[in-house]
Structures are given as C-alpha cells and as structure tokens.
Amino acid sequence: MSEPLVSIVMAAYNEEAYIKDAIESVLNQTYKNFEFIIINDGSTDQTESIIFSFNDKRIKCVKNDVNLKLIDSLNKGISLAAGKYIARMDADDICFSERLEKQVEFMEANPNIGISGAQLELFGSSKGQMNYPLTHEDIQLNLFITSSFGNNVVIFRKAILDEYSLFFPKGYLHAEDYKLWTSWITITEAANLPICYVRYRTHLNSVSVKYRALQRETRNRIRAEYFISSFENLSDSELSMRLTGKISVKRYYAIKKILKINDSLKKFDSEKFKQIIIKLWYLDSLEQVENRVSVLFKFSLILLIDISQFIKWTYLFKHYFKIRLYK
C-alpha cells in the first residue's frame, strides 16, 4: 500500500460534544489519499469511544496515558506523519468537503510555497469570517501583529519541517502557533487561499477567552523576537521590546528608529511597514486605554509620523468614554 500524500493531525481532549462532526468532515473530503492521525490526549469522557465508532482504515488513533496537553500531543502526531504534506485540524471544527483537494492542488502547483492556509468561517457563539493575508509579504507584515494563519486550516511540507525541526515550540503558552509561524516565514515562502475551507467553532471555553491576559504577554514577547529575526542587524533587544506592549514616549522613538532601519535595509515596502507599525500602536492603545487615560494623550505622538491617524485618535476617545459609561 502506497504512502498517503497528506497526513491530517488532530489532538483531542474531552471533545465528546464536537469530535464526531469534526471526524466526519475529514472523512468526507473529496480528496481521499490521506491518513488521519488523532491523538487522544488522555480523555476521560466518551471521546475515545466516538473515535473508535468510525470504521475507516485512514484513521490512526494514538492514546496518551496521561494528558500531555495540546502542544506535546500535536508534536507527537506530527512526528508520526508519513505524508508529503501535513494538514492541521482541531477537534471542535468542521472542514468543508473540498478543503484538502484545493489545498493539495495549490501546494502541488506551487513548489516554492512551503506553508499555506485559507480563510475561516466562524460559527457558534460568534458568526462571521476570519480573514488572513494572501501574499508572502503581507503575511510577513501581519506577523508583527498576530498570527497570519488559521491554525486549524494550515498545510505545510513535511520535508521542510524535518529539515529545520519546525515543531510547535514550548515556552509560548497559548500562543505556540503564532511563534511557530514566525519561524516558518523566515525559511520558506507562504500564502493563504482567499476562500473559507474550515468552519471555526467559537465558544466561551476557547483558549482565547480563558487565557487572554497570558496570551497578550506571550504575544508581545513573540512580536519582539520577530522584530529581531526580521531585521538581521537589529541586535538591540531593548529596542524590539519597546515596539510592542506599553504605549510610551520611548516606544514612539523606537518606532521612528525601526522605520529608519527598514528604509535603509529595504526589507519591507516603506509605506506598508509604516502602516503595520502604526496599526500595532493603535491596537495596543485600544487594549490599554481602558485602564490608563494617559494613553489618550500619548497616542497623539503618532500624528507626528502620520497625520492621517487623527481619525483613529477620535476612535480611541470614543472607545474610552464608551468603556467609562458602562463601568
């Protein structure tokens, strides 16, 4: 029997409410040449019996005797993968039936692309769509703010993973995927397809809701590290740390310096890079203005770099007073 072209890796811990739909959506793919590696991470509910209720030879279920948590379970599954490509899937989400067909078709037609993803349709407690940048440069730029891939719709080449040991890293709790993608982007070209291929379930027990404060702290550390890896000459870790997190006068001067460095090195398009740095300043301002009124006044410093940001200054005022009103 020939090796599968694609290995789909999914970790599950006590997902009895959702995993049946997730598994069915994978098995019903129009593309058939895959193996489906499911790591049952020490579940204590009916997750295991639901997995074994499916009689499909493509499913390879591995049970952890104890709960290893998501990252160790995913890395375990990835290390067992035999496919040319590895695709991720979460146990509470649903694939569109043509997901693998379209993603494999794209990767086969673009051998220069080492990692790609697609858009996500939200369902559950929130509805809508999560949009990710399409081109390599826009993915690079967006990574200064947040992840540029949907973790549950990504597909990548196993040969690159093996060569560079690009497993999910430890030490970046609840933001490991974001850190991993910043590593991938320094090694290979990337892209995202413009169409939704996975339905992403939103609920109040999601990691992004339960661990928001910790995610913010970890995210800021990843951003700082990404600044350093993106600019080979940027050995100043203090400068990189000032470019994310706290809104301050020191950060304003750090922004001026990194813009000058980029203009000199021509690493990114000057205008696009400036706008992404300003967007990061604005988003951090929104987070902090709820507890620090001084952010309203420090934000105005950015007008010395781009006067058009005045409109966002007014948005910040509105946000602050709206929060005050409802407290």
Image: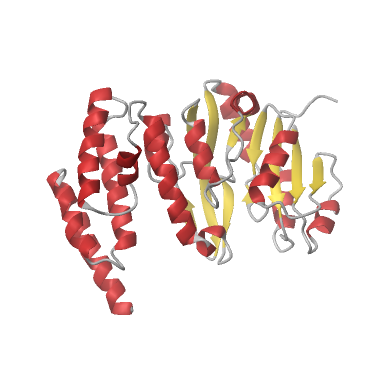
Q: Position of residue 311 (x, y in %)?
A: 18, 55
Q: Horizontal placement of 101 versus 213: left or right?
A: right
Residue at horizontal 84%, vertical 58%?
49
The residue lying at 27 percent from left, 54 percent from top is: 247
Residue 301: give x, y in percent of width and height. 16, 51
Q: Quadrant of the N terminus?
A: top right
Viewer-proximal residue among 232 and 309: 232
In this rendering, would 229 be left or right of 253? right
* Front residue of 270 and 36: 270
Foreground residue, 302 or 106?
302
Residue 121 visible to an observer of this rendering: yes
- Which quadrant, please, contains the C terminus? bottom left
The image quadrant that residue 285 belongs to is bottom left
How many numbered marks have been drawn onto this rendered protein structure?
0
Q: Residue furthest top?
A: 111
| In the rendered image, the vertical position of residue 169 relative to residue 23, given as above or below | above
Residue 236 x, y percent position in the rendering: 32, 35
